[in-house]
Image (cartoon, grey):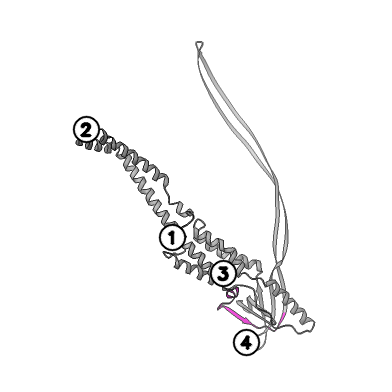
Amino acid sequence: MSDAPSMCGRARRQLHRKALTVGIVMLVIVVVLSALPLIFARTGNGALGGLVAVLLFTSWLWIIGLVLVIVGALGELKARRINREDWATATALAAHADQLLAQPRASAYSSGAVIERDPRRVLEVERHFDEKTAGEARGTLMHQFSMFGQSFGVGYAAGNRTSVGASVHAGAIRGMSDVHLSLDSTTRHDLMGDALFALFETVGQDGSADTLRVTALSNGAVHEWIHALVSQTAQRFGMDTHSGVTIQGYAGRLASHFGPADVSYLSDRLHLALAQDKRGEQAPQIQVDGVASGRGAVVATSARVGGSDDLRIFPTAFPAMWGQSVGGALAAAVPPKEIAA
């Protein structure tokens, strides 16, 4: 494992280098003063007596200096230990995050909670586009103030060259501020970022007709969800640590790798199937995998339309995969670490 390129902020807060420097200077002064009797004393007893006298006279100096040196040395050792362990944890987290990125995207779209549904036909499809708002605030700030004061002076001249004088001045500043702002904003739909709502006709357990409600988040919303999940983990470690900064650096890469790209295409295919059914044509067979979100409702994780490849909608297994990756990194760190609750 390579050494850390720099000391993290959490470790730097343990340093007391000013105390260490001042303590060393104070001890050096004591050593210099203690050397004087040894240099100039003519007898051994005189040198010893002089040394004892200097130590007694400077006892406050070397005691305080010794305490400062101990505090600074302990802080230095603690800071280096924290930084060394934090760097080891960051290295393990980076290795396990790279292993996670090496896994195929499809592995995040299947879990034990996913159920398979094979509805008969599409009854209704709706798009819900993401919205983005851009705006500009313009304004002016006006401030008016006035000062009120008074002064009083007394002078007395004694002779031609000497004078005595005194004066008193008191003042106050009063003011007021006024802010005028205007906001112009525009809200636009993201035509490539649509969430999905679809209603299917299906068959219930008793063989009677039933319905299945399928919902799916937009591609952008799922990307933001993955990014927020990784960023939250980074915040738990702390952005003043190598570990937190390392995890935050993987948030965008993990979101891009495991995020979906097929929600809009699934919406298009369902609209086509609905149009084909209305025209009396044979619509393709549709299979939806998802996580139950209520009676007769699922949040789609993947889907298949006709003989096409699986469409990736929502990576329901990603939280467990990410948790296992972080847990494995913490167990591999030396010494093992835990995330503070």
Q: Camera-side residue: 341 or 95?
A: 95
Residue at position x 62%, y 35% in the image = 174
Check disc 2 and report the residue beneath it: 42
Give whichever of 40, 179 is nearer the camera: 40
- The crowd level at tag 4 (other Cα within 10 Å; few <14, some 14-19, many 20+) is few
Q: Secondary structure at mark 4?
A: loop
Kindly identify the residue that appears in the image at 60 percent across and 80 percent down: 115
The residue tagged 4 is 205
Instruction: Name the residue located 53 percent from the left edge and 59 percent from the top edge.
Output: 245
Q: Residue 101 has which mark?
A: 3
Instruction: Give how far across and how far down residue 143 sits, in percent.
Output: 66, 39
Q: Report which residue position mark 1 lands on.
A: 85
Q: Is there CB contact under 8 Å for labels 2 and 1?
A: no
**Magenta residues (range):** 105-122
In the displayed structure, would residue 54 be above or below residue 328?
A: above
Structural crowding at the residue carrying mark 3, measured as other residues with C-alpha within 10 Å and reported as few (<14), some (14–19) or many (≥20):
some
CA gap, disc 3 and disc 2: 78 Å
Q: Magenta stretch: residue 114 in it?
A: yes
Between tags 2 and 4, which lies in front?
2
Task: Report whether 123 appears left or right of 117.
Answer: right
Tell me which amino acid carries mark 1.
Glu
Residue 272 appears in which quarter of the rendering? bottom right
Question: In terms of sequence position, does the residue under pointer 3 or pointer 4 come before the other?
Answer: 3
Query: Which image quarter: residue 103?
Result: bottom right
Callout 3, which amino acid?
Answer: Leu
**Residue 341 can be seen in this image:** no
Q: Where does residue 306 sit, x and y in percent of width and height? A: 70, 82
The tag earlier along the polypeptide, 3 or 2, is 2
10 Å crowding of disc 2: few (<14), some (14-19), many (20+): few
Q: Secondary structure beneath disc 2?
A: loop
